[in-house]
Amino acid sequence: MSATQDIHSWQQAQDIEQCLAGKRIAVVGLSSNPARPSYGVAEYLLQAGFEVIPVNPREQQVLGQQCYADLASVPGIVDLVDVFRQSDAVMSIAQDAIAIGAKGLWLQMGVYHPEALALARAAGFACVAGLCTKVEHRRLLFADAH
């Protein structure tokens, strides 16, 4: 796979399912502002039974969860790193995700960095880009119910 590949190549069913199979999700860029997409997605993930770990150096606590300045500060295992940041910040986030031993990297809609995705994939990660964790989790729940 080429690092410059189309965003749709990062939307494979097996990667989506693998990313959502874990229970601990670090949400990088999570805001305490209820109008922000990151807030609504994290709120949904909490209600769906995931452990949500806010990662944002500007926040102390979001949705009742302690916030961490960066991925390296998060205690314990992280299954998925869910990114709500500008695309130019993604490479360092991917490198940090690899360093902490996460298993998945998910770039939310509007966030795209093919080189960072390729780096994470080479490290054994399931990688998704251009989709929403909330929407995909709901879709999988609905599919499993029928």
Image: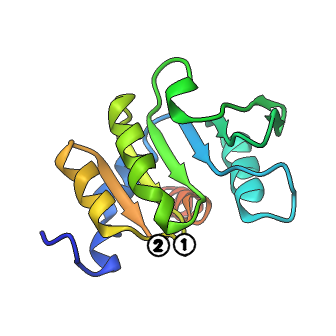
Residue 28 x %, y %:
59, 47
Three-letter amino acid code at the position of disc 2: Gly
Pick the front one: 143 or 136: 136
**Percent of width and height locating residue 82:** 53, 50
Measuring 38% from the left and 34% from the top, which residue is drawn there? Answer: 102
Q: Do the residues labelled 1 and 2 touch (CB within 8 Å)?
A: yes
- Residue 77 shown left or right of residue 2 in the figure: right
Q: Which of 1 and 13 is in front in this view?
A: 1
Q: Which residue is drawn at 49% across and 67% down?
A: 87
Identify whether 8 is placed above or below 76. below
Could you say where residue 145 lies in the image, as x and y percent from the top left? 54, 57
Residue drawn at x 65%, y 51% as measured from the top left:
29
Q: Would you say residue 24 is visible in this rendering?
A: no
63 with respect to 51 (left or right): right
Can you tell which quarter of the image residue 4 is in?
bottom left
Graded by Cα atoms within 10 Å as few (under 14), some (14 to 19) or many (20 or more), the crowding at tag 2 reads some
Quadrant location, the N terminus: bottom left
Label 1 SS: loop
Of pointers 1 and 2, the one earlier in the residue sequence: 1
Which residue bears the numbered disc 2? 130
Query: Which residue in the protein does label 1 denote?
Result: 109
Vertical comparison of 79 with 112: above or below: above
| Side (left or right) of 73 relative to 36 | left
Residue 29 numbered mark, or none: none
Task: Tell me if mark 1 has few (under 14), some (14-19) or many (20+) residues whose alpha carbon lies within 10 angstroms of its own.
Answer: some
Residue ID at (29%, 57%): 14
* Residue found at the very far top of the displayed protein: 76
Inter-mark Cα distance, 1 to 2: 4 Å
Residue 76 is situated, as x and y percent measured from the top left of the image, at 50, 18
